[in-house]
Image (cartoon, grey):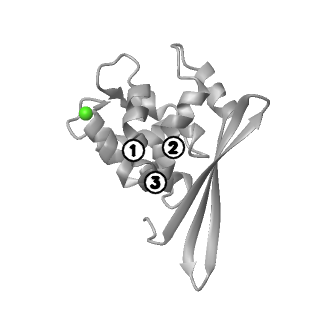
Amino acid sequence: MTDKHETRVHEHFHRKGDQITEAEYVYDEILGKGKVNQKRVHVRREVFEQIAATIKKETLPFEDFIKVVRPFLMVESALADIPEAFSLLDTDKSNSININELAVFMPAIVPNSNQYLLLRYFQPADTNNDYMLSLEEFTEFIKKGVVRDLALGRITN
Ligand SMILES: [Ca+2]
């Protein structure tokens, strides 16, 4: 499943005027002997807003969505960002996140995916099977790096 190469990840924002149009994550996989394999994941405003338009209720603005994306894609480098990501997603302040509402946005991060496929990866994170993620469940899930590994094609869905 996950390969064990050492990876460094950097985040870059692309802007047009004042607006962030894309968050780009650049992964350098250190292969040894000075060889580096570079991969990129693009999280585009356009794609996010297309998904948001299909949802009847109000969603996060893209600027907040990319704060949520950061721990999913940067994992070890962004553990400190997990509580903020959780509270942004917990819009009704219930101390829990609905896994369906989370899965619906994952195609903005994982190319060639859909929310139903992704839900398969979210369900094991919901250890007490209430279709909600507590902060503890959310944190454990992010630490596994599943979304990053899907986005990088290390896991194929
Ligand atoms: Ca739960």
Q: Name the front one of labels 2 and 1.
A: 1
Image quadrant in which the N terminus is located: bottom left
The residue most toward the bottom is 33
Q: Amino acid at mark 1?
A: Ala
Q: Nearer the viewer, residue 63 or 111?
A: 63
Please state if 17 lies on the left or on the right of 106 as rendered: right
Q: Secondary structure at mark 2?
A: helix
Q: Which residue is depicted at the point 43% across and 34% down?
A: 85
Pointer 1 local density, CA inside 10 Å: few below 14, some 14–19, many at least 20: few
Q: Are marks 2 and 1 in contact (CB under 8 Å)?
A: no
Give percent across and percent down for residue 55.
55, 19
Q: Amino acid at mark 3?
A: Ser
**Dot 3 corresponds to which residue?**
77
Q: Secondary structure at mark 1?
A: helix
Give percent across and percent down for residue 12.
65, 47
Q: Is residue 136 above or below residue 59?
A: below
Alpha-carbon distance for marks 3 and 2? Answer: 9 Å
Question: Which label number is shown at residue 90?
Answer: none
